[in-house]
Image (spheres, grey):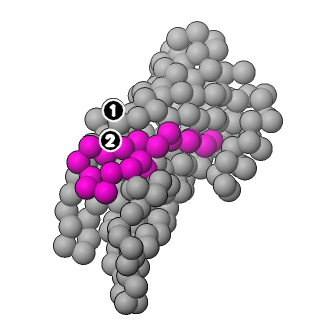
């Protein structure tokens, strides 16, 4: 809910802002810890918003947020959907009139539906967010529309608490190639 509240607040600031829609491909969710090393592929759609705080001839800085539509993992035995919703700062360096480099750094919230978190009647699952970062390039197609390609990495922790009081954790790393269109207001 916090993420959604912040995103709604940002949406009311339309000057120097961008709405983004992207598709994540070649994505892998790696769960590790407690004797588990599994990798699952899961592609999906992401929606985002960025607000530019400062811009000049070469540099642009700002803050943004990204909301992932839940995606499923075909090989994860629990099934269900998961996602990472992110708040971040970004920077861009204009290479020439149409090309720029971009980077993002922030925090993500680990989200999942009940089927993904299900571990039986004798346990419960908690998800904790973590570091979010991305690096890539962008192409200015028109003064209002950009195309970006980024490598993005999300981190989080899945903790399972058993009825007997014991618990165990899995580190979750979600790496993906993200391609998006951005519309500038």
Answer left or right for 153 relative to 35. Answer: right
Answer left or right for 105 relative to 71. Answer: right
Tell me the SS state at disc 2: loop
Tell me whether the residue at label 1 lies in contact with that at label 2, contact meaning CB atoms closer than 8 angstroms.
Answer: no
**The C terminus lies in which quarter of the figure?**
top right
- So how many labels did they put on this image? 2
- Front tag of 1 and 2: 2
Q: Do we see residue 39 in this rendering?
A: yes
Q: Do we see residue 100 in this rendering?
A: no
Identify the disc placed on residue 42.
2
Quarter residue 7 falls in: top right
Please name the residue shown 62% across and 41% down the image.
64
Q: Where 184 falls versus 5 (above or below)?
A: above
In-front residue for pair 159/20 = 159
Is 78 included in the stretch rendered in magenta? Answer: yes
Please name the residue shown 74% across and 36% down the image.
11
Residue 36 location (% of width, % of height): 21, 67
Quarter residue 52 falls in: top right
Distance CA(mark 1)–CA(mark 2): 8 Å
Identify the disc placed on residue 25.
1
Q: Residue furthest top?
A: 142
Q: Where 39 falls versus 59 (above or below)?
A: below
In-front residue for pair 142/179 = 179
Please name the residue shown 33% across and 78% down the image.
168
Q: Residue furthest bottom?
A: 164
In-front residue for pair 151/71 = 71
Quarter residue 15 falls in: top right
Which residues, given as a range, are shown in magenta? 64-82
Residue 129 location (% of width, % of height): 49, 61
């Amino acid at each position: 809910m916090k993420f959604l509240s912040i995103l709604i607040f940002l949406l009311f600031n339309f000057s120097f802002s961008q709405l983004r829609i992207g598709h994540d491909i070649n994505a892998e969710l790696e769960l590790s810890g407690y004797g588990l090393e599994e990798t699952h592929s899961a592609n999906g759609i992401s929606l985002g918003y960025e607000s530019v705080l400062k811009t000049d001839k070469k540099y642009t800085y700002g803050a943004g947020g990204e909301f992932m539509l839940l995606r499923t993992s075909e090989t994860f035995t629990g099934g269900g959907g998961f996602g990472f919703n992110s708040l971040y700062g970004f920077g861009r360096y204009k290479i020439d009139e149409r090309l720029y480099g971009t980077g993002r750094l922030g925090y993500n919230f680990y989200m999942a539906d009940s089927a993904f978190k299900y571990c039986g009647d004798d346990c419960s699952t908690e998800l904790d967010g973590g570091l979010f970062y991305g690096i890539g390039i962008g192409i200015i197609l028109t003064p209002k529309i950009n195309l970006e390609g980024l490598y993005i990495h999300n981190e989080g922790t899945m903790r399972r608490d058993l009825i007997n009081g014991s618990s165990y954790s899995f580190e979750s790393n979600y790496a993906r190639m993200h391609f998006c269109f951005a519309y500038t207001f």
